Structures are given as structure tokens and as C-alpha cells.
Amino acid sequence: MGKGQELYKKAKKIIPGGTQLLSKRPEQFLPDNWPAYYQKAKGVEVWDLDGKKYIDMSIMGIGACILGYADPDVDKAVSKAIQLGSMSTLNCPEEVELAELMCELHPWADMVRYTRSGGECAAVAIRIARASSGKDKVAVCGYHGWHDWYLAANLGDTSKLDGQLLPGLQPKGVPRQLKGSVLTFNYNKEQFDKILLEHGKELGVIIMEPARGHDAPLEFLQYIRKKATELGIVLIFDEITSGFRMTCGGIHMLYGVNPDMAIFAKSISNGYPMGIILGKKSVMDAAQESFISSTYWTERIGPTAALATIKKYRKEKVDVYLINMGKKIKKIWQEQADKAGLKLHISGIDTLGHFEFDYPNNLAIRTLFTQMMLEKGFLAWFQFKVSYAHKDKHYKLYEKALGEVFPVLAKCQKEGTIEKMLKGPIQTTGFKRLVD
């Protein structure tokens, strides 16, 4: 047990849940043995508190660091912003420049508001959309954060968000008066039509992820857009995960289906806190009729980081690179699994690939996989969020390690010794989202 796990034991006593983000809890990766904390991160390399260096072939800061850790161009711009002063009584001009850039990338949009996190983005967007439509009920398809408006879907029936979030999630602390205000559906016309039939007159907002584990069917998105327009419902695309993964901007641009609003965070600013709410003037003007305001939404670092990230993304055609490298990782997984005689189910859009071991004890095998890869110097999981900093040299090392680990997993699975090989408990499941 290294310094990271020792610190995590202390953290669990003084921080409820141990971490600020469920997706970073060590129990999801390698209970009792995950490094837990880092002292340095650069490119795709991470150093833990014991000074051990790992190549990150997992989730790259939960998908936030699309250019890689501590990208020199983004950090240079941020450093300059800090030196000039990150906060003032006056507003920073970068927020206007960023708004113009986002509207340039998305010609359907006219106006922008900012936050500093994804969950805030969704909450602000819902507030504006409700104010614009004049109706309270919201239909959701996907994962949209932790705020009351969203978790209200589980009031009275804690299974409503099972297909979107975490099965059995308890909405404790969420006012029961919100019961019935949020309705859930998947990429399924019948489910959506049922909501319209039962709640159409009260429905003011539809918020959905146009892609995550896989693309939403184009015909379905077109149908949603058509019905929202006919019924005066504000349509929001949550691009916090999908945005800038497959193209420069929202993935909806590839479908040719435009929402009334879209929200972005994560990769928009390469690891610096930033969130963007983008929308049509007819909808966004409603923000002036509601109180939506926060001091740190006016600081300079977030917009500066977003500008630097997007400019580099466009210049280097990062989307093309990410797609090619994402396809390559899927090919490596399949080839190495076939060689080892290991059954693997691979899915996900090319830049957000993931796999499952196609066996009943998938979680136990996954835990041993993470354990063995960690011993070989990799942060590895069943998900891989490719970044611009992932190069061929990293892929070659990763492929070599898989060539050594997968045969052991296959052998242990055949012999029934997977759990005997584990040095700690089996990892927990964490979020269950819209994946294959």
C-alpha cells in the first residue's frame, strides 16, 4: 500500500465519500491498491505520491484533458492570464471573444452564458429553458449531473434513472415537491411518445445526450427536433461528454440536427474549470428574467483556457487525430483478445471506446486487468478516452503489455483462479450510462 492509499484512508474519515467526484473513487478501479493521488501529470504520464510514473491509458481526467495533461500552449495562455490578474472588479474581455468563437462554430446559436462546471451548465440551461417555455416538466435522456432538478426523476421510483445514471440511486435531500417534474426516456420513440401523450401540455424542456456510449439514431434525433418545434418545447443537447470528441464543436453538427441550446464542459478547456451554455437568442433572452449569477463565473482563467484549447484544436485538426487513434485502440483490443482466446465485447464511439470481458465474472476479470496493468506501469481500465498527447510510442507499449496480460487473464479464467490472483476486493461498478 503506497502513500496514495494511505492518504485515501485518511480522506475517507474527513471527506464524505473520500473524493469530490464519484468517478474518481479508487474503489472503481482497484480497491486498496489504486494510487489514488498524483503529484504531477504531463502529456499522458502521471506520477503518484511515491514518485512512480504511469502511462494513462484510461480516462484522462474524466475526459477533460483532450490535448493531454499540462498542454504547453494552454498552460502558457493561462500563465499569462494569471500574471495579468485572474479576477477584477471589471470583466475579462476573453469571455466576449469566446462567445463569438462558440457562435462562429455553431451558426445556429446567437448567445452564450458561462459556468465553471458541467453540472452547473445543465442546471443553468434548465433554468433558462423553463423560463423561456413557461412550463416546468423536463424530459431527460442521458446523464446530466447531480442537481436537484435531475435527481428528482428518482423521487417515488428510484429506478427511473437506472438507464441513465446509477441503479438504485437514492434522491435523499431532494425536495419531494419536485416529484413528477422530470421524466426519463432512452433512444426509443415509443418511450418518448408516451411522455408526450401523458405530459405533452406540461412539457417545457427536453434535454438529451446526442451521443455517449454510441450515437443516437439520426431519425430519432430528427423526430425529437420536429416534435419539440411543433409543441414549443426547448430542446437542449448535453455535449459535456460528446462535445469536441468527434469534431470541433458539438457532435450534433455531424448529424445536421440543431438544438435550441447546447451545453459544454470537460474537454472545452483541457482540464481548467469551464462550462458553456450556448443557445438561440429567442431562448437565451429568458436568462434576463431569472436570477442566474455567480462571482467565479467571471474569472479569467476558464475563458482563456477554452480559447487556447479550441484554437489549438482547430489548428492541429485534433478531431481527425482522435478518431484515428480511437479506432486504433479498438483494433489493438480485438487483436490481442483474439490472440489470447479472450472473449471481449468492444463498443463506444471511436473517441470514447470501452470494452467488457464477455463472461459472467466480468468485474473480477476487469479488476485483475487493472491490477496487472498497474504493475506494468499503466493506469488502465475498461474505458479509454483518447487525447492528442497519446502517441504511437504509448500505443506500442500498451499493446505489448496487453500481449502479456490478456493471455494470463484467459488462462486464469479457464482455470477459475481470477479472484485468487487479486490483491484486494473486486472493483465497484460506478456509473451505468447509455452504453451498449
Image: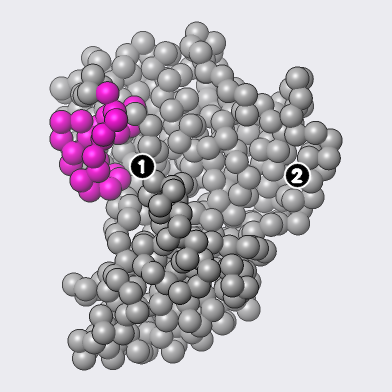
Disc 2 residue type? Val
Q: Where, quadrant-wise, is the C terminus in this rendering?
A: bottom left
Q: Nearer the viewer, residue 116 or 233?
A: 116
Circle 2 — which element? helix
Looking at the image, how many numbered discs can be counted on the residues? 2
The location of residue 43, given as percent across then percent down, is: 66, 64
Judged left or right of residue 111, residue 435 is left
Residue 20 visible? The answer is yes
Can you tell which mark lies on residue 143?
1
Q: Earlier in the sequence, mark 2 or mark 1?
A: 2
Q: Residue at x 20, y 46 (%)?
A: 168
Q: Which amino acid, mark 1?
A: Tyr
The picture places residue 334, in percent across and down from the top left corner, at 39, 78
Specify the quadrant of the image occupied by residue 233.
top left
Instruction: In this rendered view, identify the residue nearer to me: 429 or 223.
Output: 429
Q: Name the residue under label 2.
A: 78
Closer to us: 6 or 166? 6
The residue under the point 60% across, 41% down is: 273
Range covered by the magenta-colored residues = 149-175
Q: Can residue 311 be seen in this view?
A: no
| Secondary structure of residue under mark 1 | loop
